């Protein structure tokens, strides 16, 4: 089997992964697949509800957000105490992890995992994303919602748009601009490029202020400016220019690597969906997602997104319920003969890199 594919039938990527597919059935298509949302997914949803996995977990989020808040306060305190010292680079590295956890907190708020009502979720998202991270909550939420609706869809998922990297051979053959140049060696360049992801999120946020996707551009713009005024003001006031620039490079670079390490294993290297392919909701989410196996450290590091299949099926399910939901979902997929993909953390990245190399082959061939 190929390690990457465009999903038009029943082909799936191979590699160092565990797949539950006892009957060898592939995705249902056409009317048969569309009707399954009213039966297959509804039955799974019923099982989750009966298990009590959809209820809110206020105590968990109180403890988790308090811990992240204390880590942020501790990082700021260490920054102020150290002063103009190269030891600040250790603070920068620690702050990159804290920013990663803040990003995961903003993600959960956007999915209403923390609060069931829209207003408190939005206020919390604006505070965490715009004020603390310097990222537009409205822009990111719009982008992420479109990803959830059509994961790995060549033309509908913004996360696989061929802007810098290409995600299918079709995209490689049609690539222009930076994607055509970078796509030739994108597997080798993917991790270095991730160091720019923090910067990309901030630049894209400011650009999006003119977009309809941001409903409160003035308010969000003000919050973003305030964030960077404090961020850059504090750095260049307390540190020499050289140390400040080094701090930014370490902080933003490691922050980007953290986010990439959390989000990349979940879909990269999984089947791509091309225009015209019809899949019901259950199969569309399961077939394009990968769970990352691991223990408590993996759960904390990835904020529960290592249970990507369950998260995509039930986006508002609180993080601590996902582990139990995984057992129910995998068993249910086995009953239906739906391939269910699990992989180790390192193996998932290896598969994603192999996928990037393979889909870039048309660009390398054209350059010979």
Image (cartoon, grey):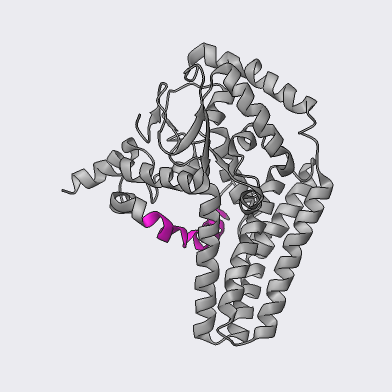
Write the residue at 64% across / 37% down: 311
The correct choice, above or below, for 149 with respect to 277 in the image is: below
Is 16 positioned to the left or the right of 255 in the image?
A: left
Determine which quarter of the picture holds residue 78: bottom right
**Spot occupied by residue 188 in the image (x, y as percentages of width and height):** 34, 55
Query: Is residue 218 visible from the viewing direction of this image?
Result: no
Write the residue at 61% across / 75% down: 91
Magenta stretch: dominant secondary structure: helix
- The foreground one among 309 and 328 is 328
- The foreground one among 284 and 157 is 284
The correct choice, above or below, for 289 with respect to 125 in the image is: above
204 in the magenta segment: yes
- The foreground one among 170 and 137 is 170
Q: Residue furthest left?
A: 368
**Spot occupied by residue 267 in the image (x, y as percentages of width and height):** 50, 40
Q: Which residues are magenta?
A: 189-208
Query: Is residue 14 visible from the viewing direction of this image?
Result: yes
Q: Residue furthest top?
A: 32
**Spot occupied by residue 272 in the image (x, y as percentages of width and height):** 43, 33
**Spot occupied by residue 151 in the image (x, y as percentages of width and height):** 52, 35
Write the residue at 54% across / 48% down: 263
Write the residue at 51% across / 53% down: 260
Q: Quadrant of the N terminus?
A: top left
190 in the magenta segment: yes
């Amino acid at each position: 089997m190929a390690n990457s594919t465009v999903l038009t039938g029943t082909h799936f990527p191979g590699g160092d992964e565990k797949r539950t597919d006892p009957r060898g059935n592939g995705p249902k298509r056409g009317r048969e697949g569309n009707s399954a949302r009213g039966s297959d997914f509804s039955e799974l949803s019923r099982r989750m509800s009966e298990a009590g996995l959809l209820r809110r977990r206020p105590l968990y989020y109180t403890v988790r957000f308090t811990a992240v808040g204390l880590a942020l306060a501790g990082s700021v305190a260490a920054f102020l105490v150290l002063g103009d010292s190269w030891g600040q680079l250790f603070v920068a590295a620690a702050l990159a992890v804290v920013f990663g956890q803040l990003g995961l907190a903003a993600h959960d708020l956007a999915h209403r995992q923390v609060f069931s009502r829209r207003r408190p979720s939005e206020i919390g998202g604006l505070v965490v994303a715009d004020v603390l991270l310097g990222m537009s909550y409205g822009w990111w939420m719009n982008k992420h919602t479109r990803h959830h609706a059509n994961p790995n869809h060549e033309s509908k998922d913004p996360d696989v748009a061929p802007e810098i990297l290409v995600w299918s051979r079709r995209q490689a053959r049609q690539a222009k601009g930076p994607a055509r140049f970078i796509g030739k060696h994108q597997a080798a360049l993917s991790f270095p490029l991730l160091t720019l992801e923090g910067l990309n999120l901030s630049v894209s946020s400011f650009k999006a202020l003119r977009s309809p996707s941001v409903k409160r551009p003035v308010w969000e713009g003000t919050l973003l400016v305030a964030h960077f005024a404090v961020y850059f003001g504090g750095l260049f006031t307390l540190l020499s220019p050289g140390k400040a620039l080094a701090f930014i490079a370490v902080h933003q670079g490691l922050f980007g690597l953290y986010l990439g390490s959390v989000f990349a294993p979940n879909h990269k290297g999984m089947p791509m969906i091309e225009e015209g392919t019809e899949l019901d909701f259950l199969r569309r989410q399961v077939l394009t997602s990968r769970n990352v196996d691991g223990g408590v450290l993996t759960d904390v590091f990835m904020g529960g997104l290592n249970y990507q299949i369950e998260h995509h099926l039930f986006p508002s399910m609180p993080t601590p319920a996902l582990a139990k939901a995984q057992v129910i979902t995998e068993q249910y997929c086995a009953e239906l003969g739906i391939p269910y993909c699990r992989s180790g953390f390192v193996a998932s990245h290896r598969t994603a890199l192999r996928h990037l190399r393979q889909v870039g082959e048309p660009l390398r061939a054209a350059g010979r």
